[in-house]
Image (cartoon, rainbow, N blue to C red):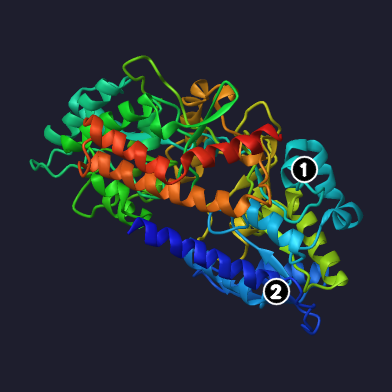
Amino acid sequence: MRHSIIRGAVAATTVVATALALSACTPPSDDNGQLVAFGPQGDNGSLKDNSFTQEVEKKFDIDFDWQTTTYDGSVAGEKRQVSLASGDYPDAYFLVPWVDAFSRSEILKYGQQGVLVPLEDLIDEYAPNLTERFEEKPDWKESVTAPDGHIYAITQWSECFHCSFPSKLWINSSWLENLGLEQPTTTEELRDVLRAFKDDDPNGNGQQDEVALSASAAEPIINYFMNAFAYAPVGGPSSPPPLVMDGGKVTVAATSDGWRAGLQYVASLADEGLLDTAAFTQNGDALKALGDNAGGEILGAAAVLHPYEFVTADSPDGRDKNYDAIAPVAGPDGTQLATWRSPVNPLGMFALTNKSTEEERMKAIKLIDYLVTDEGDKRGAMGPEGEAWVPAVEGDVALDPELEPTFKPLTYDETSNAAWRSMGQYWDSLEYRNSQVVPEDIYSPDGYERRLLYATQEYEPYQPDESILFPAEKLWPDPETSAELADLQTNIANYITQAQAEFVTGQRDIDDDGAWQAYVDDLNGLGIERYLELQQALYDAL
C-alpha cells in the first residue's frame, strides 16, 4: 500500500508541474482595477466586510476582490495548489503560515517560472519600513532572499518567546497538591506522578475516570519526552523528518539508539495506561473536549504549546488555572533538552503574481510596509485601538519590566471581524512583544502572556547547543533536485510518524531488535541515505 501511495504522489507532482509550466506563461488578466487576492477566511465574517480590509482599501486605494479558503490547512493548501496548477491564480496571496503558505521549494520554483514576481525593487522604492526591519534583523532579509538574489515572497519574523520552546508539558498542580506530590524532575518521577493520577483518584469523585496524560496529533507528544533521551527538533503533521547535526554531518535522529530509548519509555507509559493513545490521532477539538469535560476535571497533563489549547480560558470551575508547565525532565543518562524553534519562518505569507499590474504591486507592497510597523501590526493583527488594545499609561508594567511599556492588549472578542489576525502578522520582535502591558495575575486571561513567559523561562536553560541544530530554515532547495527531495521528505516523514505511533501503541514491539531493524530497513528502502545526501549538499552550500 505504501508504494502505491508514493507512485500516486509522484504522478500528482508531475501533473502539477506541467500545469505550472503552462500557467507561468499566462498573461496578466483584466481584473477591472481590482486586486484579486487569495486568503483564508474564518467563520467570524467575510474578508470583504472585515473593518481592517475596508480601512486599508481607503488608505492605499486598493479595491480587493477576495478568493477565499478556510483555516483548515489541508483544504487551504489544496485550493491554493489548484489555483496555481489551473492558471486561474490571483494577483496576490495573503497567507497564514500555520494554515498554508508557500514552501521554499514552491517559492523558488514559481519564482523562476515567472508566476511569482520579484519584490526587491518594489521594497527598495516603496517599503522603507520593511527595509528598516531587514536592517534591524539581517537574518530575516537573508531568509527571504533566494539563491538567485530575488525576493519572491515575504515571510514572518516572530520572536515570540513562548513559541520558541513549543514542546511543553502542562501538569495539573491541584492534583499534585491533592496527592501530596512534588513536580517531577526525571522520567521515572514523572511515571510515578502519572501512575498516581491514574490510580489515586486525584479529582476526588470516587471513580477511576482520570486521563493521566494526553495531547493532539497536531503537536507530537513524542517531542517533549524524547528530549530526555535525544534531541527532538520541532515536529508536526507536515514537518520533515527529525534531522540533527553531528560534527557537521546531517543525520536523522529517528534511527539513533537514543531515539529508540525514548520510544521505549513512551511505549511503557502507554502500556501502563498512563498515556492516552488517542494523542496520536485526535485533533485539537477532541483534546479540548477532554480538558473541558462537563462531568468534572479528568485531565492530568497535556503536552502542547499552551494550556488554552486543552482547557477553556476562565472556566467556570477555575480548572484553567490548575495547569503549570514543568521543566524538561531528565532521562536515565541525564539528557535534559528542550525543543527550540527559530524566529525565522521559511514559509511565504505574501507574494505577488505575474497577473498583477505595476500599480497593484506598488499598492500591495505599501500595505505590507504598513503591516511591519508597530501601528500596522497592532491594527492588522490585533484590532482597533480601544477594542483590541489601548496605549500604555503611567504605572503600567511591561511584560519585560526593563522595557518601556507601549500598549496593553484587551480581551479580544473572537467573533469580531475587525482584524486580519494571523494573516496580518509579519513582524513580532522580542522587544515589540515584550513591551506590551500584561497584568501580574498570571492565572487571569489578561495575564496569560506573563504565565507563558514564566513557563518558558523553565525551558530556556535547556535550549540545545547550536552545533546539533539542523538549520532547515536557512536552506534553499536546488532546483535540479528539489522535486526528488520533496518526494523523499514526504514519504520518509510520513513513515516515521506512522511507525512511531505503532511502536508506542504496541502494534510494533519497540523492544524487539528485529522489529527495530525492520523499521530501519524500511527507511533505507524509502531512500533515507539519498535524502541525507541531498540535505548535506544544501547544508554545505550555506
Image quadrant where residue 68 sits: bottom right
Tell me: residue 368, above or below residue 178: below
Query: Residue 284's spot in the image, x, y percent?
Result: 37, 54
Tell me: residue 145, above or below residue 40: above
* Secondary structure under the numbered disc 1 in the rendered image: helix
Tag 2: Cα neighbours inside 10 Å, few (<14), some, or many (≥20)?
many
Q: Residue furthest left?
A: 206
Residue drawn where x is 77% and y is 43% of the image: 141
Q: Residue furthest top?
A: 333
**In front of the other: 31 or 375:** 31
Query: Residue 484's spot in the image, x, y percent?
Result: 57, 52
Query: Disc 2 versus disc 1: distance between alpha carbons?
Result: 29 Å
Tell me, yes or no, if residue 50 can be seen here.
no
Tell me: residue 537, above or below residue 11: above
Query: Residue 296's spot in the image, x, y percent?
Result: 20, 48
**In front of the other: 429 or 439:** 429
**In front of the other: 181 or 397:** 181
What residue is pinned by disc 1? 141
* Secondary structure under the numbered disc 2 in the rendered image: helix
What residue is pinned by disc 2? 23
Quarter of the picture holding the N terminus: bottom left
**For the residue marked with disc 2, what is the amino acid?**
Ser
**For the residue marked with disc 1, what is the amino acid?**
Lys
Residue drawn where x is 77% and y is 46% of the image: 145
Query: Residue 423's spot in the image, x, y percent?
Result: 62, 59
**In front of the other: 183 or 417:** 183
Given contact means CB atoms under 8 Å apart, are the residues at marks 2 and 1 in contact?
no
Residue drawn where x is 68% and y is 47% of the image: 478
Q: Which mark lies nearer to you, 2 or 1?
A: 2
